[in-house]
Image (tube, helix red, strand yellow):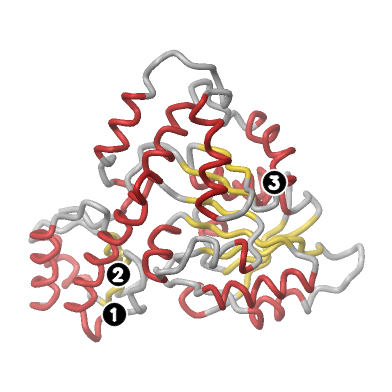
Amino acid sequence: MRFFSDNAAPVHPKVMAALMQANTLDTAYDGDARSQALDGRLSDLFGTEVTALWVPTGTAANCLALAALCPPHGAVVCHRDAHIQNDEGGAPEFYTHGAKLYLADGEGAKLTPGTIATVIDAIANDVHRVQPHAISITNATEYGRVYTPDEVAAIGALARTRGLGLHMDGARFANAVATLGCSPAAVTWQAGVDALSFGFVKNGAMSAELLVFFKPALAGATLYRRKRAGLLFSKGRYLAAQVLAMLEDDLWLDNARAANARAAELAAAAGARLVHPVEANEVFLQATPAEAAALRAQGFDFYDWAAGEIRLVTAWDSPADQVARLAAAIGDL
């Protein structure tokens, strides 16, 4: 009974069907009909003109976005627990050709204008110090916390005032939007976001993520960076097909709502063990090594997080009976 990561979840049947439908001769790279349809489809979804590029991984989406927003001699401000800092193997520095990450604090891995300003105000404006050029936030965060449109807008306002770009790591963007119940636009470009890493793999896709530029001019050099990085797939139609299938009839939102609902069931059983409020599909619990072992002995798979903490992640297909059994097991600890 796997609650280790939504990365391990199966591909949604509608996505698999879309891959089969794409299995015909078409133009190579991103010249096919499906890839060419992405800009229009995403522009409709967000209610503004965007450029949308498929990539195979969230790391690629994040780091290509940062390379578009930050020069090699610049810096990106992010939370010290951000994925780009702790889980991408130096890829941000690699893709940007040397940009620095400045680390800020914030409860639940959420930045605020105040915590960002604390970092950048301490940097002297001279040639001897690396100057910030961008901010990166994660929604939902690495601790499953969700930024509201107002919270993003406050950071967006700071970014504009300081002349900084704003990137959103949306590996679980669908889960955040499902929780908020707002339009995708309200928590992105309308709040000042310049580039979004729109995650699909955790939510039912096989191998497709999307980089969405709300300032299409940013995409020009990214086309070359994507190719130079070895990420321009010759059969890109299979990646585009996955994205289009996920967007059809709001499958991306339905899947996220299902995952969020299962996480809420576990949160209700956890009570005072909760380390963070559950706002998406991740549940962090206090558990001793002995308690974690007891859960594993019953067949539950999950991730040991910090000392005395475990992480449980639900997915679009988490079986109701397994979630109920885990909730009961947590209650019995």
**Which amino acid type is shown beneath numbered disc 2?**
Val
Q: Earlier in the sequence, mark 2 or mark 3?
A: 3
**Which amino acid type is shown beneath numbered disc 1?**
Leu
The picture places residue 292, in percent across and down from the top left corner, at 19, 68
* Side of 314 where 137 appears, left or right: right
**Residue designated by label 1:** 274
Residue 297 or 243: which is nearer the viewer? Answer: 243
Q: Earlier in the sequence, mark 2 or mark 1?
A: 1
Residue 324 or 88: which is nearer the viewer? Answer: 324
SS under mark 1 = loop
**Residue designated by label 3:** 216
Q: Label 1 vs label 3: CA separation? A: 41 Å
**Residue designated by label 2:** 283
| Residue at image location 25% in from the left, 59% down from the top | 258
The picture places residue 290, in percent across and down from the top left corner, at 17, 71
Answer above or below: position of 311 versus 106.
Answer: above
* Side of 64 where 110 appears, left or right: left
* Side of 167 where 271 appears, left or right: left
SS under mark 2 = strand
